[in-house]
Amino acid sequence: MKPGEETDGGVTTIGVPLLAAGNGAAESAHHAPISGGGSTSFFKTCFNGLNALSGVGILSIPYALSSGGWLSLILFFLIAGCTFYTGLLIQRCMDMDPNIRTYPDIGYRAFGPTGKALVSMAMNVELFLVATGFLILEGDNLHNLFPNIEYEIGGILISGKQSFIVIVGLVMLPSVLLDNMTVLSYISATGVVASFVLIGSFLWAGAFDGIGFREKGRVLNCRGIPTAISLYAFCYCAHPVFPTLYTSMRNQKKFSRVLLVCFLVCTMGYASMAVLGYLMFGSQVESQITLNLPTNKISSKVAIYTTLVNPLAKYALMVTPIVSALEKRFISSPKRGLSTLIRTGLVLSSIIVALAVPFFEYLMSLVGAFLSVTASIILPCLCFLKISGTYRRFGLESVALWGIVLTGVVVLVIGTCTALQEIYEHLVG
């Protein structure tokens, strides 16, 4: 079994590279008996949770603030509070049934095979699109560093950004072909460190490299609110990881404190980056804020190279659960050749999608509105209502849960339509 991955009933889910407790017994958390919990300490679980919540969303959150204006920060904190609450709902679902080990298990416990299939599909599609976003991110930032690179093949001119997407995808292919993901999983655990390095680099660039914090920005931009909300939701799309964190803990009663620490730290980090970026670049902020930085400054190079390194490790971890699900579906017995074909095809398909829809902000907005809202807001509420039987009773919590579900559906519909419309307009424009 691969780090951060659990298999249950033919459905593979990915968690986060867990740092297990006790004399380097890697991944012992995943092999703990159901009744006794795991062996990971409170502080290591906090680190794993911070790594799960700290992702590429930190690069796009200044753009989200620019899209919605200063007042949209209120919506950001509401989403943070709402997703913290739904994280607690996942814990309460698992407390009700000790046989629940993964997020699809919660879907199965609530709605049977259909619920499990829905949760698994949402997770795998989200992982695929996030991995595709990594390719776009790498292509944008490498093109920013080396803007004059382009070449011609068969009379077709390939720009620097397109060529970098292809090259990065091919460079990542060998890591996807690996069966042992241990090294990559621990490299990718630097996500939380990378987030703080990025914030420090931007603070230095603004204070000492002549950029300053002089932009005033807009108070409110109603037209940009759907995009802002979708990107804010994308920052909190780690809920499929929470069951893995929960089962890995030595003292599972403290899991609510883990969630509190993780959400407080990450929300402060996201908010700091949003405010710093918006004060530095105002309405001119790019969808990936690293694209605004001058490439001749040391602080800028630190930020850009930090941005480039992390996805190289995380890409393979993102697509591994999809590979496992496809192999279980189409390969009855171990066949290396067919496995290589599936893995190569998956990487090539993500390269094609990245080339066809090279708009990082709109793709991540689509992921946030359609998939993150579904997996992190709507499904936890619906599953808890069903498992707990709260849907049969009228009370304050049931009203709040149905209100969250209704709001989530509205955000899902409006945000998804807005993202698809923006992608279509940029494709045909």
Image (spheres, helix red, strand yellow):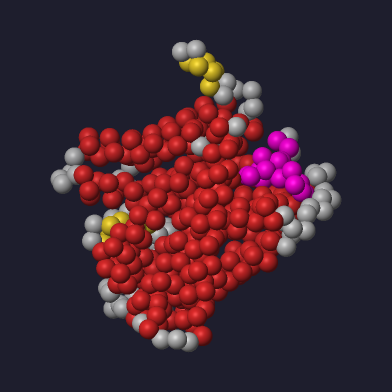
Which residue is rendered at x = 33% and y = 67% of the image?
Answer: 107
The furthest residue to the top: 155
Boundaries of the magenta span: 280-295
Q: Is residue 238 above or below residue 419?
A: below
Residue 327 seen in the current view: yes
Across and down, in percent, residue 360 comes to 56, 42
Q: Residue 412: x percent and y percent?
A: 51, 58
In the image, 344: left or right of 420? left
Q: Quadrant of the C terminus?
A: top right
Res 333 quadrant in image: top left
The verdict on residue 377 being magenta is no
- Residue drawn 50% across the image and 69% down it: 406
Q: Residue at x 66, y 40 (%)?
A: 291
Mark count: 0
Position of 270 compared to 186: left or right? right
Residue 233 on image: x %, y %? 55, 59
Q: How far across and how far down the image is residue 221, in percent? A: 72, 55
- Residue 110, located in which quarter of the rendered image? bottom left
In the rendered image, the vertical position of residue 101 relative to residue 306, given as above or below: below
Most foreground residue, 248 or 56: 56
Q: Is residue 208 visible?
A: no
| Residue placed most toward the observer, 67 or 31 | 67
